[in-house]
Image (cartoon, rainbow, N blue to C red):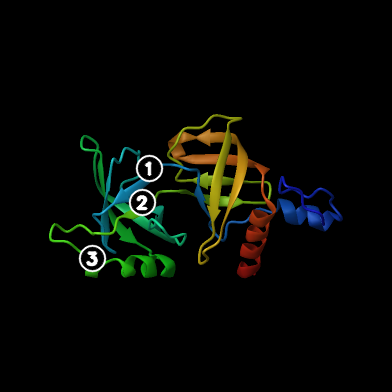
């Protein structure tokens, strides 16, 4: 089957192929970075972290939310989750418990943890932290996201990055907003551009779940 740069089949060779392309998947849960704010913090450990200039509205202060960790100068990343402990809106500070560290996140953070700790409890190596959305379900046509804390209107064009758990692979995409439900922090998107390498990344993610 020929695949176009829109990520959709340019020719549907069979009814089975059509159904496969439109099937919705709940796993793996994808990490979706819509180029939201990137936090940089020197106050972190593998148990908790402080995010400065924090102004996001959290859905529930007890609910774990997805996070991505990176270090300047490296393309490697790790996925994990954080639980809000204290949000100081007046000081623009968020303090979070760190949980559900993936093996990639554990390896990355361990490399810069205790040996670089300073006397004030901070680290000499800052971490870059992203709080992405994640998929409720997805297909090769679009996806439904949760933990979306931005603003969006129907018809808006949004670009982003897809990260797949347990890999160091990621892919770009463009999409149109179908529906935003701010009270639930959910966002429905339809792909307008899904590059071939991103399409292949999603196909490989499905195969690994089989």
Whole-percent x, y for residue 66 in the image: 42, 53
Q: 25 or 161: nearer the eye?
A: 161
- Whichever of callouts 3 and 1 sits on the residue coming sooner in the sequence is 1
- What residue sits 72% from the left and 51% below the top? 22
Q: Mark 2 points at which residue?
A: 63
The CA span between labels 2 and 1 is 8 Å
* Residues at marks 3 and 2, CA–CA distance in whole angstroms: 30 Å
**Residue 54: percent from left, percent from top:** 30, 41
Callout 3: SS: helix
In terms of image quadrants, where is residue 178? top right
Whether 117 is drawn above or below 194: the answer is: below
Depth check, mark 3 against mark 1: the one in front is 3
Are discs 2 and 1 less than 8 Å apart at CB?
A: yes
Check the image and name the residue furthest to the right.
Answer: 13
Residue, disc 3: 116
Residue drawn at 33 percent across, 69 percent down: 111
What residue lies at 78% left-to-right and 50% top-to-bottom?
Answer: 9
Q: How crowded is mark 3: few (under 14 residues within 10 Å), some or many (20 or more)?
A: few
Quadrant containing the C terminus is bottom right
Judging by the rendered image, the residue that carries numbered circle 1 is 59
Locate the N terminus by quadrant: bottom right
Task: Pick the residue in front: 116 or 80.
Answer: 116
User: Marks 2 and 3: in contact by CB < 8 Å?
Assistant: no
């Amino acid at each position: 089957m020929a695949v176009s740069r829109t990520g959709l089949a340019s020719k549907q060779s069979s009814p089975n192929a059509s159904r496969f392309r439109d099937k919705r998947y709940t796993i793996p849960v994808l990490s979706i970075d819509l180029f939201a704010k990137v936090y940089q913090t020197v106050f972190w450990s593998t148990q908790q972290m402080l995010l400065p200039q924090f102004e996001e509205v959290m859905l529930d202060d007890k609910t774990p939310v997805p996070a991505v960790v990176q270090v300047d100068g490296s393309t490697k990343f790790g996925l994990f989750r954080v639980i809000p402990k204290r949000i100081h809106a007046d000081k623009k500070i968020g303090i979070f418990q760190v949980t559900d560290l993936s093996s990639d996140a554990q390896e990355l953070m361990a490399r810069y943890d205790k040996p670089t700790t300073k006397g004030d409890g901070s680290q000499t190596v800052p971490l870059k932290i992203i709080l992405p959305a994640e998929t409720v379900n997805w297909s090769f046509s679009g996806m439904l996201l949760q933990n979306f804390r931005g603003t969006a209107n129907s018809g808006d064009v949004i670009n982003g990055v897809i990260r797949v758990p347990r890999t160091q692979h990621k892919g770009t995409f463009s999409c149109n907003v179908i529906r935003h439900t701010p009270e639930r922090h959910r966002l429905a998107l339809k792909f307008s551009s899904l590059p071939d390498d991103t399409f292949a990344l999603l196909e490989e993610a499905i195969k690994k779940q089989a």
